Amino acid sequence: MDGRTRYFGWKTVRNGVNPSILQCSMNSSADSRGQHSDISPDPAVREAMSWTQSARFLTTASLLTQLPPPDLPEVAFVGRSNAGKSTAINTLAQHRRLAFASKTPGRTQHINLFDLGPADAPNARWADLPGYGYAAVARGAKLRWQQVMADYLAHRHALAGIVMMVDSRHGFTPLDKQLLDFVSQRVGMGEVKLLVLLTKADKLSRNEAAKALAGAQKVLGELATDAADISVSLFSALSRQGLGDAALTLRNWLPREAPPEVVFAAPAAGPDSADVEPDADPAGLSPA
């Protein structure tokens, strides 16, 4: 590999078959050193990245009853411990410590919520769910917060989408596939959208990256239905690969606000013609 991080585009899984790559606008262009620029010429991507950068901490909860009312669409970030979940959130938000990445994987045992949009009128929330699959966590604690996470994914009415982080070097683990199976009904019905980010893609060669995408596509094809909205992309927090398009996808998951209805005021009028006698002279111009 020549040191450049290659962008392979988005793949949308439909009906379990191999789809063509959706050609994006190369929003993260590589410079001469192989690094990807954060600046995109696409106004839609710029707006989306400005929106993701508005993310700010709202609250943390260890029980579903501690969550705020489900009055805004929520996007849940999930992934195996050490798959790069917190780093991906921080990269999207352009904030080093918005989502805390513990030095000991598996230590985060709460749902952390973040508001997005205008400060006085947020329009979405991100939910950072605990990582899973780290063996060093005590079994009782692990079962407790994994049940909280499962209840959130199964029953949270505000859940509009799931961003799943998968280490591109290893692909879907058995636990990853178990989580996909758990959310398959809501995803298959189109109730919840799914975006899989194949993280740490900067560590892959071009051939390895292509194989990672093909492998992910095969796994996700099992969830595909006509109603499902499922996407997968290579992603790197280090090189910013896939950053702009991930931000755009998340922004497009939200319903756009309808423009305000324009109401034209009726022109000022004189007396209602019904109130004027047929032979009267409304203007009072008749000769005496």
Image (tube, grey):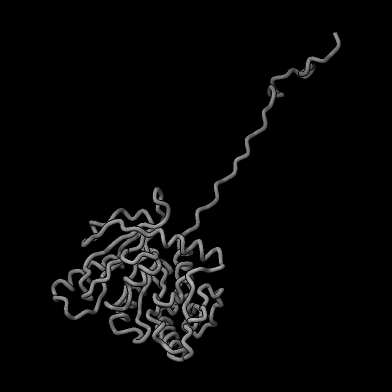
For the residue pair 30 and 127, the one nearer the viewer reads as 30
Q: Tell me what residue is drawn at x 27 percent, y 71 percent.
A: 101
Left or right of residue 119: residue 174: left
What quarter of the picture does the C terminus occupy?
top right
Q: Looking at the image, is 65 positioned above or below residue 197?
A: above
Hey, which residue is sitting farthest front in the picture? 33
- Compared with 259, 148 (above or below) is below
Give the x, y percent position of residue 56.
Answer: 35, 58
Whether 63 is drawn above or below 212: the answer is: above
From the viewer's side, name the closer residue of 91 and 265. Answer: 91
Q: Left or right of 144: which side holds 257? A: right
- Say whether residue 186 is visible: no
Q: At 31% from the left edge and 84% from the top edge, which residue is drawn?
A: 173
Which of the two residues, 84 or 219, is positioned nearer the viewer here? 84
Could you tell me if residue 33 is visible in this image? yes
Q: Position of residue 248 (x, y in %)?
A: 48, 67
Q: Quadrant of residue 195?
A: bottom left
Q: What percent of the width, then of the height, locates residue 245?
A: 48, 71
Residue 125, horizontal then vertical, whole percent: 36, 59
Q: Quadrant of residue 283?
A: top right
